[in-house]
Image (cartoon, rainbow, N blue to C red):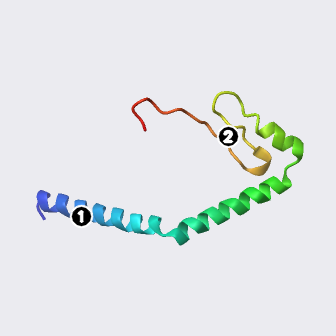
Amino acid sequence: MNKRKMIGAHSALALLALAVSQVHAADPTVQQGREDRAEKAAQKTLAKMTMEEKLAYIGGTGGWDVKPLTNYGVPQIHGADGGVGVR
C-alpha cells in the first residue's frame, strides 16, 4: 500500500472511531449510569464524614484548590482559571 492510501486508511479509521465514540457518549443511559454511580459514591462518603470533617473540607486550601480527603480516597483538586481567549 502506498503512503497516500495508508494515510487515507488511517484517517478513515480515526474518523470512524471518533463517530462511534460520539454515539456512545451521547447515549443518555450511559451518562445517567455514570451520574448515578457518582452520586451514590458521594452520598456514601458524606455519610461517613463527621460534621467537623465536612466543615474543614469546604474551607479549601487557598486559591482555587480543594483539600484532599485522604481517609476517603478523594485526591486534592487543583483549579485554574482559563485565559481570556478560552471560552
Indicate the secondary structure of the residue bearing disc 2.
loop
Q: Position of residue 3 (x, y in %)?
A: 13, 57
Specify whether 24 is left or right of 39: left
Establish if 9 lies above or below 52: below
Task: Classify the position of the C terminus by image quarter.
Answer: top left
**Residue that appears at 45% across and 66% down:** 26
**Residue that appears at 68% across and 44% down:** 75
**Label 2 sits on what residue type?**
Gln
Establish if 14 lies above or below 59: below
**Residue that appears at 72% across and 37% down:** 67
Establish if 56 lies above or below 6: above
Task: Classify the position of the N terminus by image quarter.
Answer: bottom left
Q: Position of residue 7 (x, y in %)?
A: 18, 58
Q: Position of residue 2 (x, y in %)?
A: 11, 61
Indicate the secondary structure of the residue bearing disc 1.
helix
Specify whether 23 is left or right of 69: left
Mark with earlier residue (1, 2): 1
Q: Position of residue 21 (x, y in %)?
A: 40, 65
Residue receiving disc 1: 12
Q: CA distance from mark 1 to mark 2?
A: 40 Å
Specify whether 27 is left or right of 67: left
Q: Nearer the viewer, residue 31 or 16?
A: 31
The picture quadrant where one finds residue 10 is bottom left
Total labels: the figure holds 2
Residue receiving disc 2: 76
Dot 1 crowding, Cα within 10 Å, few <14, some 14–19, many 20+: few
Q: Are marks 1 and 2 in contact (CB under 8 Å)?
A: no
Dot 2 crowding, Cα within 10 Å, few <14, some 14–19, many 20+: some
**Label 1 sits on what residue type?**
Ala
The picture quadrant where one finds residue 18 is bottom left
Specify whether 11 is left or right of 26: left
